Amino acid sequence: MIIRKAEFVTSAVEESGYPDWNLPEIAMAGRSNVGKSSLLNSLCNRKGLARVAAAPGKTRLVNFFNINDELSMVDLAGYGYARVAKTTKASWGPMIENYLRSREQLQLIILLLDIRHDPSEEDKMMELWLKDSGRNYAIALTKADKLTRQEQNMRVAHFTAILSPSSCGIYPVSAEKRTGIDELWQLIADAANLENSMPRSREQVIPKYKTKNNDTKRTNG
Ligand code: GDP
């Protein structure tokens, strides 16, 4: 499957503002500046899709993106940014929690953590909340390019030891170098139940483990 459409649809603060569709949704959560916009752009091969925030904490809503009319990526407001007004901070919890609790078609949550830093208190709270929610969730360790491969492996082992086992695993990723992007897409495609598909740009090669991919026949969802 080639990404022929990746577009921002709407931002919402509450349920009444969520898009009225039945696309499977994959949500991304993480503290401000963790690299959420960059990862979303990298996953979708669109530089400006989620604007890489000039100042951290800019994204404060639940943002819905339509990918190929087949699935929706949902960018949850970044948390933990000190300069955000107290009122905004107070509304963050209920807003995100409401989405995570109520959204039926939500198939997977990807929690982003910076590979170089141990989880903050808020990260830990988020992770525990996800565990208790019974939802499928995975951890993406961002900015992996800042470390050597050996250091990355050590950090993955460290996160594995300090976090409760996430239902869908831990993925080191780099939006900059596109490391781990295919693996993350595979996880997303499986969670969204997309048949035999891995979104990728035209120039990317078919990964070794996707031998039976029949992209060109797929014309719609
Ligand atoms: P957000 O606030 O979570 O959406 O984070 P952004 O995507 O805006 O990224 C925050 C900062 O981290 C920016 O300066 C990005 O250039 C940088 N960044 C994001 N992803 C990566 C990555 O994979 N590698 C490196 N080296 N920097 C990254």
Image (cartoon, rainbow, N blue to C red):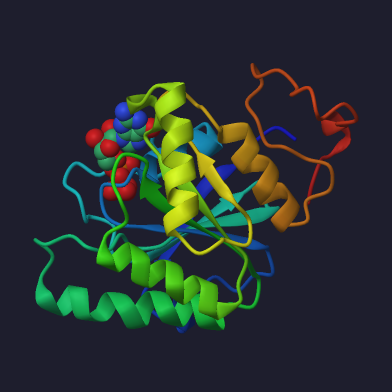
Residue 40 at least partly seen: no
Residue at 60% x, 52% y is 169
Splitting the image into 4 quarters, where does residue 19 fall? bottom right
From this view, report whether residue 78 is shown above or below residue 104. above
Ligand 1 sits in which quadrant? top left
Residue at 40% x, 62% y is 76
- Residue 162 position within the rendered picture, expressed as x and y whole percent measured from the top left: 42, 57
Q: Is residue 23 left or right of residue 194?
A: left
Q: Is residue 169 left or right of residue 110?
A: right
From this view, report whether residue 38 is shown above or below residue 178. below
Residue 152 at least partly seen: yes
Tell me the quarter of the image containing the N terminus: top right
Residue at 40% x, 28% y is 151
| Front in this rendered view, residue 77 or 151 | 151
Splitting the image into 4 quarters, where does residue 209 fall? top right
From this view, report whether residue 135 is shown above or below residue 33. below
